Image (cartoon, coloured by chain):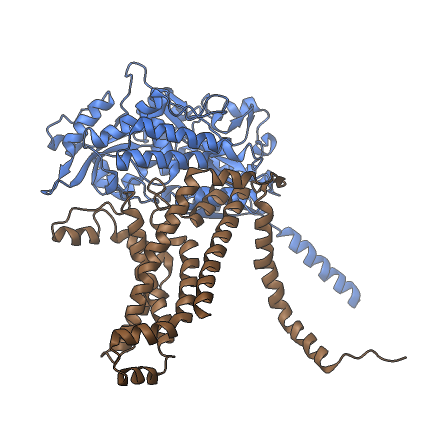
Chain colours: A brown, B blue
Amino acid sequence: MPRFRLSVRARQDAWGFAFALPAVILFGVFAVYPILRTFYLSVHRYSLVGTPEFVGLTNFRFILTDAGFAQTLRNTGFYALGTYGPVLVLALVMALALNTGVPFRNAFRVINFIPVVISWAIVAIVWKILFNHQGLINQFLGAFGIDRIPWLQSTTAAPWAVIIPSIWKELGFYTVIFLAGLQTIPRIFYEAARIDGAGRLQAFRFITLPLLRPILFFATIIAVIEGVKVFIPQFVMTGGGPSGATKVIAVSIYETAFAFGRMGRAAAMSVLLFAIVLVLTSMQNLVYGRDRS
Amino acid sequence: MRTALQTVAALALVLGTAAFAQTTITFWSHTHPPMVDLNEALVAEFMAANPDIRVEYQVIPNNLFFEQMIVSLSTGTGPDVINMGNVQLTSDYIPRGLVVPIDLEASGYDSLEALRAEYVPAGLDGATVDGVVYGRPSEFNTDMLMIYVPDLVAAGYSEDWAPATWDELGEVAGNLSRFDDAGNQTHRGFDLVYLHAGWYANQLQVFASQTGCRFYNEEATESIVNSPECAEAIKIWADMIYEYGAADPRLTAGESTVPLQDYISGTVSMTFVQPWGMELVREGDPERWANTKLVPIPQVDPANPVNRVSGYYWAVNANSNVQDEAWQFIDFLASHPGRWLIDVNFLQATADMDELAEAEQFPYADQWLTTLEAGRFTEIYPHANETNEAVRAALESILLANADIEQTLETLKVNLDRVLQ
C-alpha cells in the first residue's frame, strides 16, 4: 500500500501554519469575533441581559435622527482637525529643525518625545488640574491681566482644553515619524539642487515634500484614525461635558453601552464609526494614489 | 496493611478538606471612607463568627460605580452582595431581574410583616416593586442645610439665623460671598456639589420635590419635564448663581471621593448635607465641624415642608450561587444600626432608631428625624443613568452657560422622550 507523503513545500507550509496557529486563534477570538459580534448586535436590541432581539435598522435610524449623536460627530471632527492639523504641521516643522545641525538636537529630540511615553490617563489628570478655574494656567493668564477662563466648564472653552494637551502629547510621535522620513532622503539631492541655484524653500517644495509624501500619507492616516477614535482625554478631563460639548463618538459608545445598557445602539454607533474611518482613509488613499500616478 | 494506611490517609485528607471548605461571598460597594472602614470591620467580624464563610470585599471608585455594577451584574460577573441606590435599584436592577427578592428565611424572619416591623413605615419602599421587597436599607438619606457659623457672624448675621425660604437663603448667601479686585468670586456663600450625573439629578430632586416637578408622567410613557413646576425647581438653583451671586459652579473642586471638599476646605459657607456627610466634615476638619450648624433646608412653602428621601439598599445578585449566605451576611450588616449611626452617620430607618443608645450621641438626631417625617421618596423613573445624564446636560447648559430655562427644558423633554424609546 503506497504511503501518503507530503511534499517538502507542503510540510514547510504545515509547520508554518502550526506555528502561526496560536496567534491566528488569539486574533480570531479577540479581534475577528468581536468585530462580527458588533455587526450582529447593531441590528439587535440587547441590554446584556437575555437574548438579543432582532430590530433591523432601528438602531441606525435612531442614531441618525438623534441630535445628540450629530453633536458627537461634530465634536469628533472638531477634535480631530483641531488636534491633528496643528500636530502634523508642527511636527513637520520640528522634524525639519531637528534634522539640521542645531546644537543639543539629541536632547531636544528626547524632550520632544517625553509626552508620548506618558500614559494618556495621567496626562489628562494633570492637565485637568492645570485647567482648574483657579489652576496654574488661569493664574499665569491673570499675571498678564487676562480674565480667568472657565476651561472645563464652558461649552466654548472645553473643546480647546482637550485639544491643547492632545497637541502637546501627540507632537513627539509625529515628529519622530517625519524625522525618520527626512533621514531617508539622500543629501545628494539637496546638494544638486543647491548647485542648480535652488533656495531652501524650493528644496523643501520640490525635494522634501515629494519624497516625504509616503510618510505624510502614513502619518495622516494614523492621525485621522487616532482623532476619530479618541476617548481618554474627553472621558477623564470633562466626561464629555459640559452639556455634551466634548462628547466624542467613542465616549458616546462607552456611555450608551455600559452606563445605559443599550448594547445594540452602541454597536450601531461602532459600525458607523468604522464606516467613517473607512471612508476617510479611502479618500486619503485615493488622493495619494492619484498623486503617485 | 499499606493499602489500609493509604485509604485512611486519603480519607483524612478528604474529610480535612471538607472541614475547612469555605463558601466565598463577594461584596462590592462605592467609595465612602467611613463606610469602607466599617464594612471592613464588619466583614472581619462576620468571618470570625462564620468560619465556613469567606467574604471578599471590594470598593469601586465613585465615578465608575454605576457603570461597573450594572455591567458586571448583567454579564454574570458581579458580586454576590451589592449596595445600590434606590433609584437605580427600582428603575434598572429589579426590572431587569438582576437582583432577587429578599429570602426571609435566610434573613432570619418568619414573615415580611416581621421584617417591615423592623423599619420605619417607608423603610423598605426604596427597594420595593409591585409589593415585592428586594433589599434592606444600608442608609436612608434626606437633606439639611449645613452652615459655617463664623462666616455668618462675620457678615453681621445672628448665629441663630436659619432661612425659611430659598430667597432668604439666596440673599444671605450672596452677602457671604467674596470677590477679588478683578471681580472674580473667591468664596461662595452657598453652593452645591457638581460631580457625576447622579449627583446633578439628586440635588435637583431637592427642589423638584418641593415644586412638584416630575421628569416623567405616572405611567412613564412621556416626559413632562417641560412643566412650570420643573422650571421653578431649576430656577431656584439658577438664582443662587445669577440672581444672588452666591454660587459659582466653576469653582467646584469636583472631588468624587470627598464630595463635600469645598465646604471642608472653607471655600463655601453653606451647602446641603446628608447624614453621611457629617462624618466626612468631622474627619476632614474637626475644627470646622465644631463651628458648623445644621438647620432644615429652606422651603418653597414653609407651611407645608417637603423633603426628598433617598436610600441605598443591600441586595443579592440573581446570578449568585450563595444566596442564602449572602442574605445571612446582609442580615449581619443590618444588625448593627447603632454602629452605622455613630461610625458612619448612616440612618438605617429602623423603627427603634430614636431609642438606640447611640442616637443620643448622633449629631442633630431630633432634627434628622423631624426632616424625615416630612420626607418623600424621590421619583422613580426608568433608565435612571440615561435620564440622569440627559438632566445633567440640561442643567449644565443652564447653570454654566445661563441658557434659557424654558427652552432648555423643551429640549430636555425631547431627549427624555427618546430615552423612553
Please report the residue visible at 40 percent of the width from the left and 56 percent of the height from the top. Answer: A227
Please report the residue visible at 48 percent of the width from the left and 55 percent of the height from the top. Answer: A279
- Residue B118 appears at what percent x and percent y? 49, 25
Residue A266 seen by the camera: yes
Q: Is residue B99 left or right of residue A212?
A: right
Most foreground residue, B369 or B1 = B369
Q: Residue furthest top?
A: B303
Q: Residue furthest right?
A: A1
Instruction: Using the image, determine if residue B409 lies above or below residue A130.
Output: above
- Residue B38 appears at what percent x and percent y? 41, 42
Residue B364 seen by the camera: no
Give the quadrant of the N terminus of chain B.
bottom right
- Residue A50 appears at what percent x and percent y? 62, 40
Please report the residue visible at 17 percent of the width from the left and 26 percent of the height from the top. Answer: B171
State how many labels appear. 0
Most foreground residue, A273 or B333 = A273
